[in-house]
Image (cartoon, helix red, strand yellow):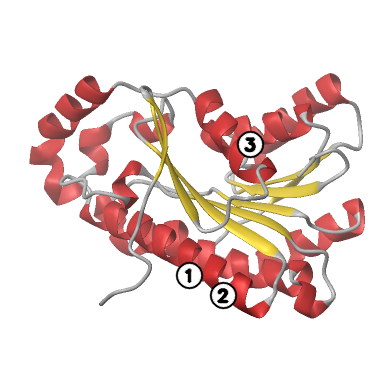
Amino acid sequence: MALDGKSAVVTGAAMGIGRAVVEILLKNRAKVALLDINETAGENLLESLKQQYGAGQALFIKCDVESEEQIKAAFQKTTETFGGIDILCNNAGILNESIWEKTVSINLTSVIRGTYIALEQMSKLNGGKGGVIINTASLAGLGPLQSCPTYTATKFGVVGFTRAMAAASDTAGYGIRFNAICPGFVETDLMTNIPVRLGQFSNLAGATQKLVEMMGTLTVSEVAEAVLELLTDETKNGEALLVLPQGKKYMQFPNSVE
């Protein structure tokens, strides 16, 4: 899949992995709608992108992914501006065990919500052109992170949802590929003040820190390169791509529970 002329939506786009994904999409000549709740960071990034890539290539929309109304409005504005949506990157996420219900809402519920709203425009069953949806999961979506049970649960959920949607698309003919990106520890704001984010599990921060030191950390650009692979390789559907400093690996799962 060539990205030239494609239209993409990225949530959690103002910083971290989202920002890196936005930049790699623009480098590959896609047009991108940046969705983020942080208006200042989003507007500042948009100005920087305009200088680098020219006006009309990117659009910033303040959006709370917990709001169905705001997501629908943002997708509609993207379609009006760019003529449709070919790519959705459900990337917004938090790590905070103290507010576990909000963690579930942002990390998992919003991924499901965003996907279902996007289907209304993208699915070939609804007259859409098809496309690709990439969901940001985590290493914690493939194996439990003991200091972050709720975060782990949400990322396992994202992987499972992605795989089920890929199978549904194959069977029903949505014309949409679904893949999950599962990075290890990434150099983002999510990694700062980890003990504060762990709530009742803050006593396990030392074990997590040892794991970080053992595994190493990724740059956001390395994660974005892996997202680009999932976007452009048309053979990839229902994949969970593990990305570590040591390399990438497509995970193998049983096809069914017996």
Instruction: In the rendered structure, find residue 164 and report the number of the disc placed on it.
Output: 1
Residue 168's label in the rendered image is 2
Q: Residue at x 58, y 58 (%)?
A: 178
Identify which residue is drawn at 11% across, 33% down.
207
Q: Earlier in the sequence, mark 1 or mark 3?
A: 1
The amino acid type, in three-letter code, at marker 2 is Ala
Tell me the distance, in whole angstroms, between the alpha carbons under discs 3 and 2. 23 Å
Q: Residue 96: give x, y in percent of width and height.
A: 31, 48
Quadrant in the rendering for residue 193:
top left
Helix, strand or loop under label 2: helix
Kindly identify which residue carries mark 3. Answer: 228
Q: How busy is the neighbourhood of tag 2: few (under 14 within 10 Å), some, or many (20 plus)?
A: some
Q: Is residue 107 visible?
A: yes
User: Do the CB atoms of the residues marked 1 and 2 lie less than 8 Å apart?
Assistant: yes
Q: Is residue 249 left or right of residue 216?
A: right
Q: CA distance from mark 1 to mark 3?
A: 21 Å
Does residue 110 lie above or below 188 as drawn? below
